[in-house]
Amino acid sequence: MKKLITGLLLLSMLAISCKKKSGTNTGGTVPTPAAESAPLKSVATYPIGAAGSNFSFINTALSSAILKRDFNAITFENEMKNNALVNSSGAYNFTTADAMVAAAQAANLQVHGHVLAWHAQAQGGYYRSILSAAAPSATNLLQNPGFENGDATGFTAYTVLNSGNPAGTATIAVGAGAAEVRTGTRSLKVVNPTAYGNEQWRVQVASDAVTLEVGKQYQISYWVKALTANGSIRLSTQPSALYQADQTIGTSWQQVTWLITANTAQTRIVFDLGNSSNTYFIDDVSVNEMIGGGTSGNNYAKVDSLLKTTIYTIAGHFKGKVRGWDVINEMFADGPAGAIRNNTNTANASNNDVFVWSEYLGRDFGVKAFTYAAEADPQAKLFINDYNLEFSTAKLDSLIAYVNEIRGRGAKVDGIGTQMHVSINTSKTQIDNHFIKLAATGLLVHVSELDIGVNTNNASSVVFSADLENAQADLYNYIVTSYMRHVPKAQRYGITIWGTLDNQSWRYKSGADYPLLYTATGVKKRAYEFVLRALQSGL
């Protein structure tokens, strides 16, 4: 949930930047802090957290060590979002999130759950298939679905797009024998010795183009297994890219399905296998049109049931392991500012990874979501979370009015999260005023995704000069100080910085911005010391 206004410019949201994790696996030892420095957690009177992904918190020693050293709370950047836990056929997979929770607990890091109900990074295609009651046709549109046709080294109707870095590092071959083939006599065998992390495209095999009808929904299915546990695979499409969430692959054959809405008449199906090192076997691929559906007259009840099941399953699974939840995220649109989202005012509402809950539930959405969350995890603190609250008075006022409304209808809302993806030219007066209004609600206030950009012109790259570093440090200090000056101690849920190393940030984009507290090599920036000073102020 990463949105940012720079002046009057609304940069596009991840759905984004979370969808593809940024950064480079930077190893090495953790730099020794300056003598006058100290861990932020050692001076903060409330939890001070950072966002961490599986890549940055589990697989990258440098950022993981820094997070454990300087912070006492963590929000998972992607791994508790809907399409990270729910696959395109509705099954749940908690393997990665469970491992991260265990690692956080071992490091004495409090976990903030993010997020139970958000329109983005959701299994929108799957949920809409339930509403329309469609089913896949019997006709497989894909050529050579079982990889049976081809020569000793390749396959008819498939092309190797990338084979590692440098090319040839990975091996794409013919699988043979009972251990490597599910049905028939051949399978697709991919040996990738290198984990490229978020660069899944480094190892790619694509089908020939499949003829689809724009606007229609299709189910893509394949069977896959890996030689060792914890493999990773995803699908994408070309030329108009759609992306499946990363799928965790074990050592037994498993069927993976993905629902897409065709956005071009000719589509290649691409297997992306660069995330982790492993040997993969793929067989029995299909592309089938979804047919037999119709407009349902009972979508309210169906979506209500889906919401309840989703929240009960996810919040119930992590019950007792998280301090709080972002129950609803980004419910309010940008245009008109403060309006509740629907399919008209939400960009790409028909995309497979978008599902606008409030399109079907309207103003009841919040009542139902918070009620189900409270029932599933009664001890957790429950938040509504949104972006640009420091920028848009209309959105802030609408959100506060809505919170008052649903609390009056019996919903348990404990707090408000203000993301604060801001820039060095964000108005300090607006920052103060929004904290004052949030504090006046009497609820907990969470600065939930703080980062400060220095690229105020939306340039493709920027030199991180001393002047920019000083301006960034000053605003970090101002925000932390304003939070403590205007939000009473009893209402301070905490501050979460949205990441650790600059080059792992969703805003970094190969040098376009440097929004966090540490350089790519783990050196504390001036912003770190200015946050530390604010926390030491005694406010």
Image: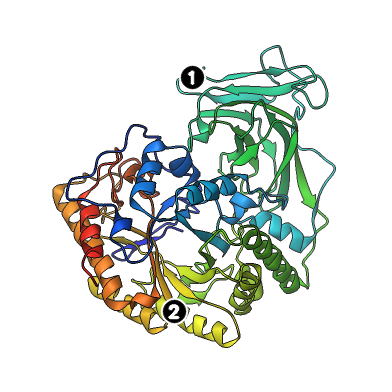
Estimate the x, y position of residue 180 in percent, counting from the top left.
74, 22
Residue at coordinates 25% horizontally, 52% vertically from top-left? 38
Label 1 to label 2, Cα distance in Å? 55 Å
Estimate the x, y position of residue 417 in percent, counting from the top left.
44, 69
Binning the other alpha carbons within 10 Å of mark 2 as few (below 14), some (14 to 19) or many (20 upward) gives some
Query: Please, what secondary structure does the residue beneath circle 1 have?
Result: loop
Estimate the x, y position of residue 248 in percent, counting from the top left.
63, 39
As drawn, the label of residue 403 is: none
Image: 243 above or below 325? above
* Residue found at the very far top of the displayed protein: 152
Does residue 422 appear to the left or right of 377 in the view shown?
left
Image: 69 above or below 280? below
Residue at coordinates 75% horizontally, 60% vertically from top-left? 130
Does residue 15 appear to the left or right of 492 in the view shown?
right
Q: Amino acid at mark 2?
A: Leu
Quarter of the image where the C terminus is located: bottom left
Image: 298 above or below 534? below
Query: Please, what secondary structure does the residue beneath circle 2 have?
Result: loop
The reply to whether callout 1 and callout 2 are in contact (CB within 8 Å) is: no
- Residue 494's quadrant in the figure? bottom left
As drawn, the label of residue 167 is: 1
**Frontmost residue, 294 versus 534:** 534
| Of pointers 1 and 2, the one earlier in the residue sequence | 1
As drawn, the label of residue 443 is: 2
Estimate the x, y position of residue 91 in percent, counting from the top left.
72, 50
Image: 363 above or below 351? below
Residue 285 visible to an observer of this rendering? no
* Residue found at the very far left of the displayed protein: 467
Does residue 200 appear to the left or right of 300 in the view shown?
left
Residue at coordinates 50% horizontally, 23% vertically from top-left? 164
Q: Amino acid at mark 1?
A: Ala
Residue at coordinates 57% horizontally, 78% vertically from top-left? 412
